[in-house]
Image (cartoon, rainbow, N blue to C red):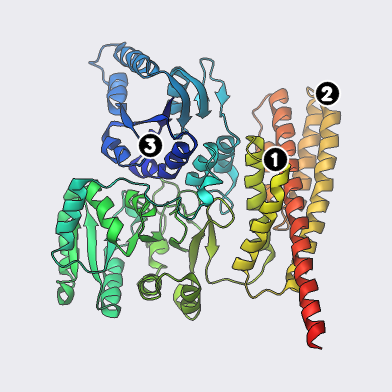
């Protein structure tokens, strides 16, 4: 069996596929797995465990053939035809497209394969996704923010790896080390290796940079607080001058603060031995998430902590609370200063790194030590990447208080994940028992100081609000059934949109029902679709929300039973003491 994985994006996106590749390898252990990437990322793709062969897509050649005036008119067509024929001749039985742009969609539509999962466009432009997870990716780009799943987890779900990824050892050994990489790392660490931290001070976009002066202050604080630690500052050959100037700026620590100008294979081997990697949103962040090193990511500019942030359990993400963040990739910062970077203080990042270095990575101790540092994190968010609920979620580590928003989001994420898995036929109804147990344990981990009575009250209130939302959706369903008989009636259609807008405004008022309100925005703002297409969007949205709502209600009711058992046990113990 041959499987083709397509990713025609940037370096970080290729490395972020490492968990999905491992999941595919777990499901098809005897398959021959090929990966198709842009020509400048072939060496990186070859470092992913499970990839047997890397195919090259010459995107630059295609683009230049299309736009340069002195090239033959049909050069791009002829080259693409020959490329598609060559790839199709491999005889793939399964194709995964993890790119999600139009170029990859058309290309995957042309390549022969018995089964295709991911965005595929056929000759008429019709779209297919092959998985509920990929369809959800297409939707969440438009309306979800903090509620979004990380793209790495969406790709895991699309290839059937959500449950496989629950194993505590799943994220081990995602990348291959090479002999050359080990030798390079050994020379950079020196003849007497010691514990070390890696700093990645640059990103591909100046807006996402935290700033050399803040990294420099961070380095000073780490070295001052940890006498047995050295710091290696990562850089590509083109960044050598910047990295060397950075290291020379702290002459008092010249023997413990050193440049590490490394190839990608050298970076992989360095990460195998590093204690911590501190980085911005760049490809090295994804290499770190695929390694044993703990990642501390500083989010700034257009970096999106929720969709493309660090994805390994136990990694930390620190972001500011600036209302304009994250900005668009192509937007110029409109602020007079780089506010989102300035808000993240070096002392706050140092507190996280020092805790990781000195508390033996014990999470409970880490939370305790940081709880006394709340002032350091003023105007910033500190998140821990958590996988106890399935797809990675960001848990605010300094907030253990129960709130409607935190509880509702916890339930909704689980319900959404279950709904997608059920649609792809990977779960049956009997699975809810173990899922409720998992959700209960997750709530207890997240809110350890919350009493059973308080949690029962919050769950009861949530169930009441979800039942109210269920009534609203039933009302919309009935209205749609009546509208079906007169879709072309513009007046009736306007009335339906107005009704949806009114109900959406009511649902948006509370965290428990906000997830229902957001997808309805697309319907309200759609003034271009033909009446039939608009009606179909309405019907699909309501059906989707009904399933998610029913799943959420099942989870809440199951959790209420567990909490009632907690209360009963507590009352029995109290009675025995009396």
Q: Residues within 10 Å of mark 2 (few under 14, many from 20)?
A: few
Q: CA distance from mark 1 to mark 2?
A: 37 Å
> Residue 33: x, y in percent?
39, 31
Between marks 2 and 3 in the image, the one whose residue lies nearer the viewer: 3
Give the structural element (helix, strand or loop) at label 3.
Answer: loop
Instruction: Point out which mark residue 21 bears.
Output: none
Q: Residues within 10 Å of mark 1 (few under 14, many from 20)?
A: few
Is disc 1 in contact with disc 3, using a CB cutoff of under 8 Å? no
Q: Is residue 570 visible?
A: yes
Q: Mark 1 or 3 closer to N-term?
A: 3
Give the structural element (helix, strand or loop) at label 1.
Answer: loop
Q: CA distance from mark 2 to mark 3?
A: 45 Å
Residue on which disc 3 sits: 9
Q: Is residue 322 visible?
A: no
Q: CA distance from mark 1 to mark 3?
A: 35 Å
Question: Which residue is found at the position 35% from the left and 60% from the top?
Answer: 293
Instruction: Point out which mark residue 486 bears.
Output: 2
Where, by quadrant of the figure, is residue 456 drawn? bottom right
Q: Mark 1 or 2 closer to N-term?
A: 1
Image quarter (top left, top right, bottom left or bottom right) of the C terminus: bottom right
Residue on which disc 1 sits: 428
């Amino acid at each position: 069996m041959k499987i083709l994985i397509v990713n025609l994006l940037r370096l970080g996106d290729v490395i972020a596929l490492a968990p999905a590749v491992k999941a595919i390898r777990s499901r098809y252990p005897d398959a021959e797995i090929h990966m198709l990437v842009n020509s400048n990322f072939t060496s990186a793709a070859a470092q992913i465990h499970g990839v047997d062969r890397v195919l090259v897509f010459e995107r630059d050649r295609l683009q230049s053939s299309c736009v340069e005036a002195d090239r033959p008119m049909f050069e791009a067509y002829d080259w693409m035809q020959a490329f598609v024929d060559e790839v199709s001749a491999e005889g793939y039985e399964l194709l995964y497209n993890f790119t999600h742009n139009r170029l990859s969609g058309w290309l995957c539509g042309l390549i022969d394969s018995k089964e295709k999962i991911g965005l595929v466009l056929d000759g008429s432009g019709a779209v297919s996704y092959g998985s509920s997870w990929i369809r959800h990716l297409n939707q969440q780009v438009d309306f979800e923010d903090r509620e979004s799943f990380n793209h790495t987890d969406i790709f895991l779900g699309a290839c059937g790896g959500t449950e496989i990824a629950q194993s505590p050892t799943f994220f081990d050994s995602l990348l291959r080390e090479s002999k050359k990489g080990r030798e390079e790392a050994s020379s950079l660490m020196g003849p007497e290796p010691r514990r070390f931290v890696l700093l990645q001070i640059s990103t591909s976009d100046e807006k996402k940079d935290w700033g050399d002066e803040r990294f420099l202050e961070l380095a000073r604080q780490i070295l001052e607080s940890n006498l047995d630690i050295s710091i290696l500052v990562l850089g590509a050959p083109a960044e050598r001058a910047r990295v060397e100037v950075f290291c020379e700026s702290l002459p008092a620590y010249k023997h413990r603060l050193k440049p590490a100008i490394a190839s990608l294979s050298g970076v992989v081997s360095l990460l195998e031995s590093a204690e911590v990697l501190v980085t911005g949103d760049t490809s090295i962040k994804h290499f770190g998430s695929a390694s044993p090193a703990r990642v501390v990511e500083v989010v700034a500019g257009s970096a999106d902590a929720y969709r493309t942030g660090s994805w390994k359990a136990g990694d930390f993400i620190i972001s500011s609370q600036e209302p304009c963040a994250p900005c668009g990739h192509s937007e110029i910062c409109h602020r007079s200063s780089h506010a989102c970077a300035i808000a993240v203080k070096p002392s706050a990042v140092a507190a996280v790194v020092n805790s990781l270095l000195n508390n033996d990575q014990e999470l409970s101790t880490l939370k305790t030590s940081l709880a006394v540092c709340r002032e350091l994190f003023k105007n910033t968010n500190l998140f821990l990447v958590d996988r106890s609920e399935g797809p990675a979620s960001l848990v605010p580590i300094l907030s253990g208080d129960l709130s409607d928003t935190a509880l509702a989001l916890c339930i909704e994420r689980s319900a959404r994940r279950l709904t997608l898995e059920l649609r792809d036929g990977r779960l049956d109804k009997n699975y809810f028992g173990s899922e409720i147990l998992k959700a209960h344990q997750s709530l207890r981990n997240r809110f350890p100081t919350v009493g059973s009575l308080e949690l029962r009250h919050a769950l009861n209130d949530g169930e009441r609000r979800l039942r109210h939302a269920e009534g609203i959706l039933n009302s919309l369903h009935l209205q749609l059934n009546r509208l079906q008989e007169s879709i072309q009636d513009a007046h009736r259609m306007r009335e339906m949109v107005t009704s949806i807008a009114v109900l959406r405004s009511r649902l948006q008022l509370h965290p428990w029902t906000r997830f229902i309100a957001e997808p309805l925005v697309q319907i309200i703002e759609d003034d271009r679709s033909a009446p039939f297409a608009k009606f179909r969007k309405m019907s699909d949205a309501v059906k989707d929300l009904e399933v998610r709502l029913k799943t959420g209600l099942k989870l809440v009711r199951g959790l209420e039973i567990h909490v009632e058992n907690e209360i009963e046990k507590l009352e029995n113990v109290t009675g025995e003491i009396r």
